[in-house]
Image: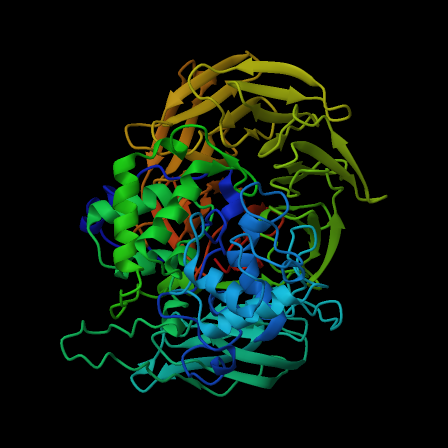
Amino acid sequence: MVQNIMLSKISRMFRLRRRARLCSNQLFILRALCAGLAFFIAPSGVGSASAQDVPGNGLVDNLQWTYRIDSYTELAESGSQRGENIYFFKCFACHNHYAKTAPPLKDVYQHNTLWNGQRVNDDSVTVQIKNGSGGMPAFRYSLSDKDVADVLSYLRDGRNCCFESEEPPANPLYKAEQNKWPVPSEVKGGVRGAVRSTGGPLEGIHVQLIAPNGVRTTVFSDFNGEYEFPRLQTGEYTLRVSTPVPYKAYRRDNVRIDGAAKLEDIVLEKDPQPGDPGALRGALPGIQEIESQLSGAELLWNLQGTDQEKATFVRLCGIGCHSFQQIFRARFDERSWRVMIERMIRYTGNSLVDRRESGYSFGATDSEVEVLVKWLTKVRGPESKDDPVRLFPRASGASTRLVLTEYELPRRELSIHDVFGDAKGNIWYTSHRTPYAGVLDPRTGIATEHKLPLTPGLMPGTHHVAVGKDGTIWFSENWSHHLTRLDPTTNEFTQLNPDQTGTGNFSLAPDGFIWSARGGKQIVRIEPQTGKIVNIYPLTKNPTPYDNETSADGRFWAGGSPPGNGYNTSLFLDIRAGKMYELSTGDLSHSASRGGFDSLGNAWYGGRDGAFIEMVNEIDKNKGVSVRTFLPPTPYFPYTEFYEAVPDKNGEIWGGVLHGQGFVRFNPRTGKWFVYDNPEPSALSRHAWIDESTKIPTVWYPDYHTGCIVRIQPLE
């Protein structure tokens, strides 16, 4: 069916680096690290590319989302709007009005002096940004003069500045409402063509058509370089190749698409090779235009450093609260890296507001922190230079047999977290740090937003979403500690029992009751109308499982473990018997994250050390519950992990390759691991939902990094 993942020696090489990582509910820091009075995270060590240069640089076009994110052109190419984009990454998490450690920056130009006593003007604000202060890193090595000028333009704009999570900015590439256009559900029968270079046909190339409504449909070239699209609405599209490296960008606007016509061949030109004759064969220049097309794991693989340094980085920074890309696009001196890391591992919660009174988050040690500071200063310091980079191989064989659709949402910086489908075929989604949740119509690409009620003094944001049998939509509000239901017929919200019900992951049982984990080593069952806790199931080993899942027949509940050292546990409850099984997942720090039940009553979870974890249910055989772990023969990308493991109706298990570029599909009956590539170098999926109504299951996931909802349709 799909491509087998690589060979075995390398597996042993990289398996040593798999450890539990930093973070968990610090998801608020997605894409970035933040320091006390800081401007949030920064671009690659190669510096910010000028937005005006994007279309003409020949290596990447300005429709590549990862490049737009790296160059801060998600909202605009220059000026105050681009300044807002930079502000979001560098200022917001510390200077929002919920934070307690940094002053708000709104109307900063209306004050006489800064907090350091300097008179407020462009020069003094520029100095503060570039030099930093005691609790603020110096951004002189990360922000160009143009970047700073755009930030100043935004700060001076008292009417629009400054960004707060209550009203995230509009997405300029969302056009579904103004340009009505149908999105196909079928997978074949449209235009076809071929991709080649001077060396012959090219396999595994991401060929993409962008419709007038902004929806992107991607297919992949096969061994002969040939590709075929679904049958699309007749009209004009943008034809492009996504992540073209190691080839130059290819894009044609206003391409007429009609029926099953054959398009002219796409001929790709190879990227330039490094000029150094001693450079590794096949390596490419380590510049932003190329690095923006690499996954976080590829970037880490190409950086200098020992196994200990990289393993420490992955353990402390790789749990999935943000992408590796957001760290590696920063460049700081040692003092500033120390400030950033101190901020990350001392603070927790919605906006990094609450400081830990003692110790570091998730068992980090002083020696690990020191290793991390020194290594980041070495590879992302003021004087460090990027070596030429090598790429992992493209998809080949049956792994090119899929159609992938990316849907834009009305707003940027939503930090989309979970998706869930309803009976009408719509996809509901959550926003981890704004009050906006919504529902996507996959047939049109139109997303309808719903703004949840704000809780005074508490950061907005939703975590999980689920749809009940009666059509009621349920959200968990992770920062304000609500469990909230939406009546889709009236669009009315009801918030239940703050601080008593589920605030992160939860599950809806077939009887409509809600299951959730609480602090204090408890699993609770909640009455859905009142939010009253009707059953409590105590735990002895695991303080709070990260996920909560119930089986389709309502007989079993299962949960994973918190991220961190020592949490090698998983939980399984026989609800009928009232018996809790607290199980070990082995010696490695698997830190089982999120998952679901298969049709046999076994529970599956993604492990943050890169394993799939199965809780084998043999209760009816009087054998209880046991644990099996499954590691790929070799990691498809070194330094990756799983955030989830979601079974489909055929018993195959799906999960995004966190910090990689694809989705894994595992068949436990045959032991085969397969992978599907994404057109963007990201698969930061927190919770995928599988549509079982299609002949071959269709996978939906929200990409936390790119801000798009993605549909995966395998052809076989």
Q: Is residue 161 above or below residue 573?
A: below
Question: Hey, which quadrant is residue 630 in on the image?
Answer: top left
Whether residue 633 is visible to the viewer of this picture, yes or no, is: no
Q: In this view, does 324 lie to the left or right of 303?
A: right
- Residue 76 lies, in percent from the top left, at 60, 73
Q: Residue 527 in the image: state x and y as whole percent.
A: 72, 22
At 52% from the left and 58% from the top, the residue drawn is: 89
Would you say residue 301 is visible in this rendering?
A: yes
User: Which color scheme does this rendered protein use?
Assistant: rainbow
In depth, the one of 401 and 610 nearer the eye is: 610
Asked if residue 456 lies left or right of residue 129, the reply is right
Q: Which of 628 and 291 is in front in this view?
A: 291
Quarter the N terminus occupies: bottom left
Q: In the rendering, at what x and y percent does residue 439 appear?
A: 70, 52
- Left or right of 557, for residue 47: left
Q: Position of residue 145 (x, y in %)?
A: 46, 73
Q: Nearer the viewer, residue 383 or 266?
A: 383
Depth order, front residue of 567/675: 567
